[in-house]
Amino acid sequence: MKKYKNLVLASVLSMSLLNPAFILAKENKNINNAETKNVSEDSVKGELENIKKIFNISNDYEFFNISRVPIDNYTGNKFLEKLTKDSYITNYEWTDDKLGSINVSINSNGDLVNYSNIKNKDYENLKTKENVSKKDAEVEVLKVLNEAIKNFDKKFAFSKYSIDRYTGNQIFTYVRSLNNVVFVDQKIQVTFSPYEKKVTNISTISNYGDSISFVEDSNFKKDDKIGLAKAKEIFTQESPLKLSYLINEDNSKRVYFTEIPNINARTGEIEKIDKISYYSAKETAKDEASDNLSQVEKKKLQGLKNLAPQSEAKKIAKEIIGDDYKVKSFGTYTYDKVYTYDIRLVKGESQADVILNAKNLDLITLSNYESSKPKSKLSKAEVKKIAIDLTRDYTNTNDLNFKIAEVTMYDDYAEVFIPRYVYTRPVIGDGITVEVNYDKNINYFSRNFSDVEFNKEKLNFSEKEANYIYFGSKDFGLKYQMTDEGPKLYYGSVNSINPVIGEDKILRDENENIVNFKDQIKYEDLNKAKDKDIINYMTDAGFGIVNKNLQDKVTYKEFVNLLENYNSDVLKQVGESYGIKNLEKIKDKNILEKDAVKAIVYYQNLNKFTEAKDIFKDDVFKDQKSLKDYENYYIVAKGFGLIDENINPDNEMTLEEILYLINKTM
């Protein structure tokens, strides 16, 4: 969405292609309209006055702009493109060098799309104001939403509350909900500043952009026939969580995983949602394939005797793409010790790119940009045979499981995925992807094989238990999801994730982010906590450990993951940044108070203070000198209010103690 700041009237009027109705003036002093369509001056005034009232916008802003732009309705979704034809977004913007800026976007149906209020005031000065409780903040949030969005209370349902761990802002998320069923493709996220005591941002969140705001209640149909129990039965039969390998950088680990199917709530059939056209979704190849090697690498290449002949590589490329293509350019590249031949071929205006392993001439990647509109589709069996034959002929087939190759049919082409299996288990994301158009030509080929060590370690729970954990997570359920025919009712993942459950039995997505974090936090000893409000606040801010109680000890790894927001494989990188030596070796030991205090000083970027000379008192703590190398860290932590005088440096800290310590940093 475009924003226009401090425009002069001439530049505004010149933008005739937008067909705008513009207002540019000191607030409400005068109105200048360019050529307008579908809007009258009175309706603009009415909408403007309503916006000012809802968001309490003063007359003190120096500049004001209003612009009307056609909706960017290319979403790859036929239903939305038809629905939003001739629709538009009106952008209102107030700016002032001292006050900051306010932006409000309204669609042509009169519905709020986005709002932001950015202050130029010093943020630190705002922190001196009192905090606002979640309950009081929600009252203000709902007041604004009900005024800004027609029938908000009937269209949206509360989804999530969280606290930004860095700013303290309170985040309220509401999901579109019809017939008590969530529409996963439309959410509204609202930011409430406890320091300014008001809503500062409202954002529409969707993979379909602003077009999603035009979907009406009448577009949703209630046709659930099979029921949740039957849906779970279908899921368990067709796509349960199975033991798999998850790759994370240079490591592999065994987890339970599945690609969640969408189960048609009326028929019980498994469906795939159409994706955006191949030609818009795929990354384009390099403009020119050329030899970009340094002199050092060229010398190395010259000394390598086992690179395959370039003439043979060109021959294979033409075999795959077609003899009527000509080689336009040929380059030799090196990617992480793997040498490749990158070959561009052309035929008229059509072009194709082929990447081969320079040593064994295995096909790595193919992109063919010759489009076609065939009269009829191929069968799944025909598509599968073309993809498998290509793979067998031109690349290494070790570890590939051809028997369960999956075929997905689209309007203009079909996609075949041949998964990689190691020790009879699938490797998540690894395999061969082949796209075949219905003229039997290859549009795209990609070989993705992770170069890591695979071990045979076992998990201490079964596939049956993994599926039980998943069903208890509240992720699997009834949902509306956008299709080319409009919103459709499915059973599937309401968080739009593929579940991963590892040895800690915590539900994560493929990027190892915890799913439904607050629902998985269950402290059985919460009522015994010294301050339940702080514990609940920390949970809202994303601090906590699943499958632990507050009185449980915390390991070094768990402590670092708390600070890193569950980035679970960061130990090698962050040990020094937290002042903890040999973190990789001690990660599974319980963290000592002295190391937690030292790490918090680093976490707050206060460690340089420990190097100051002749400023530290000798009587801050009892037996202070016994702290040795930790003495200055304790004094700095005490000086900045992170700890009090009651210390126990060799104490193995509990989760409750850790949460109170981190809370002091906030």
Image: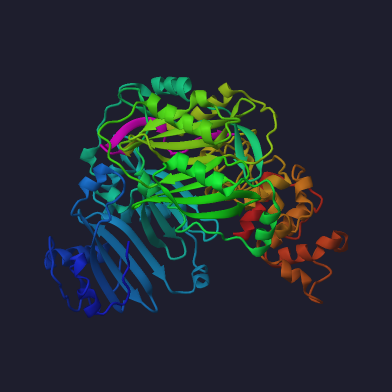
Q: Check if residue 491 falls in the magenta segment.
A: yes
How did the renderer colour the structure? rainbow
Q: The C terminus appears in which quarter of the rendering?
A: bottom right
Give the answer, above or below, for where 629 lies relative to 411.
below
Q: Quadrant of the N terminus?
A: bottom left
Is 51 inside the magenta-drawn segment? no
Task: Report the front residue among 200 and 109.
Answer: 109
Please give left or right for residue 540 compared with residue 173 in the image.
right
> Does residue 187 appear anywhere in the picture?
no
Establish if 29 lies above or below 600: below
The answer to which of 49 and 258 lies nearer the viewer is: 258
| Residue 362 in the image, given as x and y percentages of width and height | 57, 40
Residue 333 placement, left or right of 75:
right
Which residue is at a point 73% across and 71% down the rendered structure image?
A: 609
Please provide percent x and percent y for residue 486.
Answer: 26, 38
Residue drawn at 53 percent across, 25 percent down: 468
Image-based side of 540 in relation to 31, left or right? right
Residue 275, percent from left and from top:
36, 41
Magenta stretch, residue numbers: 483-501
Query: In percent of the image, x 67 and y 65: which residue is there?
Result: 605
Q: Is residue 563 visible?
A: yes
Nearer to me, 139 or 427: 427
Q: Is residue 460 above or below residue 13?
A: above
